[in-house]
Amino acid sequence: MIVLAGAEFFTNSVEWLGKKLNLGAGAVGSIFAAVGTALPETIIPIIAIVSNGRGSSGHDIGIGAILGAPFMLATLAMLVTGIAAMIKRKGNTLMNIIPDVMRRDMQFFLIVFTVAILASFLPIWPLKLVVGVFLVCAYAYYVYKTIKTSIGSHDEDEILKPLIFKRKSENPTFVPVIIQLIVSLAIIIAGADLFVGSVQAVATIFGTPVLILSLIITPIATELPEKFNSVIWVSHGKDTLALGNITGAMVFQSSLIPAIGIVLTDWKLEPIALISAALALGAILFQFICLTVKHSLKPSYLFVGGLFYLVFIAFIIFRG
């Protein structure tokens, strides 16, 4: 409930931020919302890597968290959004999205995440460092491109719900919008942290294996902000914001965050990590092909993410 309340505050404030900056749904969803709600799962690998010496188990935890976030977004988050969209429309009708925005995000993700994974096979660390620099530059270009194409595209006729911190104001100033945004992020991070702690406690009580906990349960918890935000935006009929929140977070977490892992670790990926990455790429490649051919998406297309997630679960179970 804490994360859900924070997500409601966040979606409200980030929409007003987009209006104040005269930005369209592409930049609002893919950058501001995506980066903001990616904070909980971003902090975990950074702390795990930085707080441990080189070559320690902390690096394994950090690398697992880095790869787990894009995987969960590409599979489970897409599935949840698809279910919410189908319920909202009471059927499998086309989603109200901006195809170019979704295609851009998915294409960036497919490129940068593939490069990040291939860096694991490079023989020497200096070459991996070059890849890390490339990933940072790629994300900077992505932000520039997204904002450039989004400036002035905000729909002035769109009626936004009143800012929660200024309900009586039809056009709140910039300050309360930023204050609500900061407060909502704090609520989301605190709620996600409490949820992860609760899941870990329950897993310990029932003897859930650490592998299952680290690869499946914790990533589900840390991706709650994106899932809740997307469900809220879908319920409001704002599908570009809903999907952009997910795809934008995927670009962020497949470029800047792997760059940190590449620079601070030896970046040698285990087979199970490579499989999760391949499944994430496969799930988004399917969506990208559908979007390219159909020029839109149906909620049922997003269900494929759930199938890729089940494949990974089956692999974990059969692997023991």
Image (cartoon, rainbow, N blue to C red):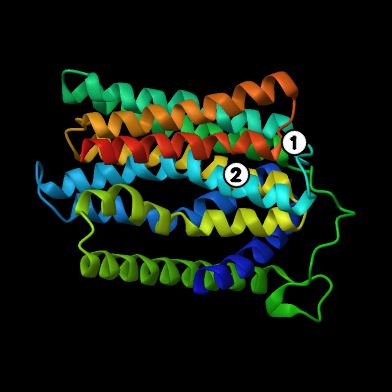
* Residue at x 75%, y 25% (from the top left corner): 295
Residue indicated by mark 1: 98
At which x and y percent is residue 208? 23, 58
Give the quarter of the image for residue 150. Answer: top right
At which x and y percent is residue 232? 67, 60
Q: CA distance from mark 2 to mark 1?
A: 12 Å
In the image, taking residue 43 as reference, residue 179 lies left or right, namely right
Residues 207 and 13: in front is: 207
* Residue at x 58%, y 52% (from the top left corner): 32
In the image, taking residue 208 as reference, residue 145 lies left or right, namely right
Residue 270 in the image: above or below residue 230: above
Residue 315 in the image: above or below residue 29: above
At which x and y percent is residue 300? 66, 37
Q: Amino acid at mark 1?
A: Ile
Q: Give me the disc on residue 293.
A: none
Residue indicated by mark 2: 30
